Amino acid sequence: MLVGVIYIGDRETGKTSLAMELAHPSGNYVKVISPDYEYLKGFLFDHEHQRTRATDAEQASYERTLEIQVTLPTGSKQISLDWIDTPGEIWRKTWQSKNSDQWKTFLENLRQSEGILLIVPPYRELIKPGYDPDLFITQEQWCNRFNRWVDFFHQDCPKIRHLALCLNKADLFCDLQKEASQLAYIPNRSRMNWQQRHDYIFQKYFKPIQSQIKEINKKVSGLAVRCFITSIQNRDLLELPWIYFGSFLAK
């Protein structure tokens, strides 16, 4: 069984959309066996407003188990993934102080995890022309926010061994097809291995926080940090972090 992977990020980063799209039947090398897509969509999608529902801030986390089948070079492997969805509000100090017991319970669960998947939004200066820049935080704000994640991983995640940093909504800042052709996972004949994918994305899209990422690696002993770009508009990019976890945590 796959050791619990904590799935986290601030509000409006696209966490729920990514999880729901992962379960879509059109999967390549990652298929969600249970629960099925229609079941997930039933409670994750708001049909009236035609968008995914925000995670309720009443609880610190909502635990779901996804049965996932990943196609690896060694063949198909079925894993059990603990998805702990968190509302963005819980990363705010005001929420933590008002809900200290729930915050404590969440941290206890987190400290048992070997893997974390962090979804971060694109920043204003990265966005392609044609989109409203006011909908996105500035690069400076983005870097300051990530500094808090650095402290969080150092202080509260002593057992983490694999951290996937996913810069989401890649369709807003890059040529999806071009990047997918470079990065796509194809058993036994991928153009890049995991380290090469990380190096490529790290250098191209994570430049403003490269020193912080290196600091995380230095502060948390035995940790492997891997950078990804994700989008619900491209299945190849969407699947990569999950295939990575399947490859390294389902042993």
Image (cartoon, rainbow, N blue to C red):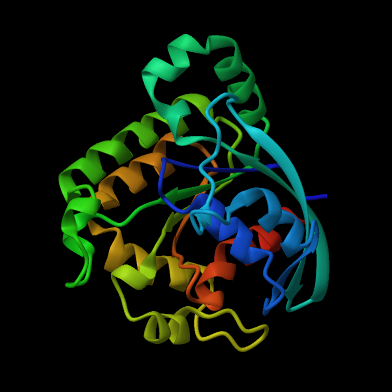
Seen at 44% across and 84% down, the residue is 182
Q: Is residue 183 above or below residue 97?
A: below
Whether residue 2 can be seen here: yes
Residue extending farthest to the front is 48
Seen at 27% across and 49% down, the residue is 209
Q: Pinpoint residue 191: horizontal percent, then vertical percent.
A: 51, 86
Q: How many marks?
A: 0
Q: Residue 207 occupies which quadrant of the picture?
A: bottom left
Q: Is residue 186 above or below residue 248?
A: below
Q: Looking at the image, which is closer to me, 232 or 77?
A: 232
Left of 189 or right of it: where is 118?
A: left
Left of 110 or right of it: where is 34?
A: right
Q: Pinpoint residue 107: horizontal percent, then vertical percent.
A: 58, 23
Seen at 38% across and 29% down, the residue is 151
Seen at 46% across and 54% down, the residue is 14
Q: Is residue 100 above or below residue 10?
A: above
